[in-house]
Amino acid sequence: MTPKGRQALAVAAACGLVVAVLAGAGVAVWQDLAPDERELLEPILNPRLGLLIMIGLVGVGAAAVAMKAFAQAGIGGPALLADEIGLIVGTDPARRVKPSGSPELKRIAEAVNTLADQRRSLQEDVEARIHEARLSVEEERNRLAALMSELNQSVVVCNLDGRILLYNNRARLQFKALSDAPAASGGGGLIGLGRSIYTVFERSLIVHALESIQERIRRQSAQPVANFVTTTRAGQLLRVQMAPVLATAGEADAEPVVSGFVLMLDNITRNFEAETKRDQMLHTLTEGSRSSLANLRAAAEMLEYPDLDAELKDRFLKVIRDEVQGMSRRLDETANAFADSLKTRWPLDEMQGADLVAAAQRRVEKKLGLPTKLEDVDPTVWVKVDSFSLLQAIAYLASRLSDEFEVREVRFRLSSAGRLAHLDLIWSGQAMSTETVMAWELEPMSFAGESSPLTVRDVVARHDGEIWLQREKTQHRAFFRLLLPLAAPQEQVEAAVYLKGDSRPEYYDFDLFKRTEGGHVLDDRLLSELAFTVFDTETTGLEPSEGDEIIQIGATRIVNGKLLRSESFDQLVDPQRELSEASTKIHGITPGMLAGQPTMDTVLPAFHAFAEDTVLVAHNAAFDMRFLQIKEDRTGIRFEQPVLDTLLLSAVIHPSQESHRLEAICERMGVSVMGRHTAIGDAIVTGEVFLRMIPLLAEVGIRTLGDARRASEKTYYARVKY
């Protein structure tokens, strides 16, 4: 029961006791009177019964006032003192209790202040020693972070869960260009500490690259890196190089294990488009001019006849003039404007052929459960391939062999022949027709739960290669032969580093290496382990159900117990309705500031991406969430993640406090209020308040997200609806 509840119970008990005593005394006196005395008193008391009741009520009121004062001193005073002590212990060690109340409470407050001074002195001494010990570590960390931020290449470091723990300014700009809505709050919805890299890249691509790296580590390769090329949702073409982050298992002689990975990104969209246009220009010039050249040659041959009459001679000369003019026109048109791409060519990366075969073995055995063996794999062969799509094609062919011809084992063979590599997929069993092979080549690949719009023929065309079926009649075997382009052997990866001086180390949190997702239910996760998006909105009014609209969304993120001010979402929104002067006086946003801003249809998906995979936090969250929920049907955007409300949590932590307004909470917890009534300013203040609440919640046994939600639902304020 809350202190206020106990005070009310004490007052009610005192009043009841007074009523019981008066009633009992009256009944006892009346029973003690003789009958003649009762007859004598009845005419006297009956007219004065109202006066007696009034006297009794006055007595009850006096008892209530006295008990309320006593309860306030005995219950309310200690409760407020307990809240003050909790703030000193949990959030603000510099805070001191103001002695008030009874002499005993004043003595307790003075003793608490003395202990707080001693504790603060000890904390300062410990912090000074820790600071000295961490100076060298911080210096090395800052050097690394500065180096990463100064690189001209986009760099992102992730742990094995795919959570981003470091990125540089170049990567921030790169991800902005990859965003579906770059105009909304700078396109900051894709990248951030603790965010998942799988919002940009398919999980299967990363898993495939990690498997390739681990295989190279087992082979003790000098450069255990992987390369792949992929497209993003926004249509950008990226070349990615992945390198492992290695850590030891704890023992000095233990083999290193992969604890994370580094992604180096290059946007090659423009280069690829330029190459495609050059290819199309050559195609136009060659194919378009071929018929003209044929006509010119035929006309020239006819002009060689000596007995050719004048009319025919003029006609052939006209043909020559027309074809020459046509060729000239095509040259001009090709130089000024290129046609669309007729054939997509995919950038390829170099890798050792043995690594490609090993990856194919692992994929076939893991996905299909089909045993594999090796035959004559040349370790010196290097190939230029898109390994992801090529391995899909190999696994697809193996699955068709297993499903339709009951093949129980496949073998791989790799050799070089001139400028090409021969990769053979071999099996024993029933022969197949050429028509079957052609059907397999032209169907979109689908196997073992995976599907791709590409066909085997598309994959082979990407590599400018060939595929055919060949039989070994003497051994009663057959094989698919894939012709792939050879590459020069590479012993190390060359990287040019370009330094640039316009960014500083901002975006890193190395402690995230220690995080793993596991299979825990989110409600069972500790609040200190979760990632949060703290947000606030400014609106045209206070009635979302009556047509009021959001005009600004501001948000920041909390990751690993840190408020990331540099990772923010701050966007004005065109409400497409009039803005009243009364609301402008509160938030300072004028109609002119909203002119030309994106609408909610554009901003809401961007904010949803920014807040994805986090717990939402707001002050009086029911108000802000109602505005978002009203837009669900129109935009299709739903915020289904958990929501915490600092107003409700304040009522949980400090039930005896009168006010739970944001300003009052900030005053209690020593948080400076800046930028009030701006969305981003309120979001930052709310984030700081929430961080200070976490240890206070732990003190009352609320440690997990589920604990916080259940405690919030029991408060009075949780029943307020919008």
Image (cartoon, grey):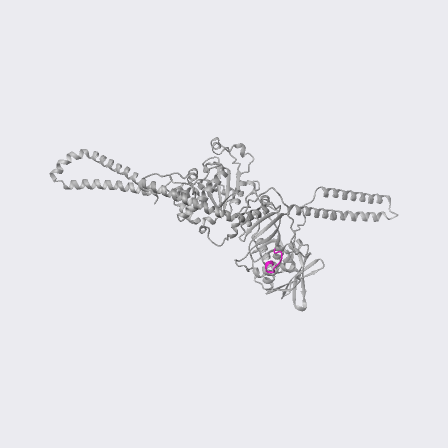
* Depth order, front residue of 396/5: 5
* Depth order, front residue of 356/565: 565
Q: Quadrant of residue 478?
A: bottom right
Residue at 57 percent across and 47 percent down: it is 143
- Is 327 left, or right, of 50 in this rendering? right
Q: Against 248, is 191 above or below?
A: above
How far across and how far down the image is residue 687, in percent? 47, 42
Quadrant assignment for the C terminus: top left
- Is 655 left, or right, of 222 in this rendering? left
Residue at 32 percent across and 40 percent down: it is 103
Which region shows up in magenta? 216-224
Q: Against 173, is 375 above or below?
A: below
Residue 500 in magenta stretch: no
How far across and how far down the image is residue 128, in percent? 48, 46
How far across and how far down the image is residue 116, in percent? 40, 43
Residue 220 in magenta stretch: yes
* Depth order, front residue of 95/58: 95
Q: Main secondary structure of the magenta part?
A: loop
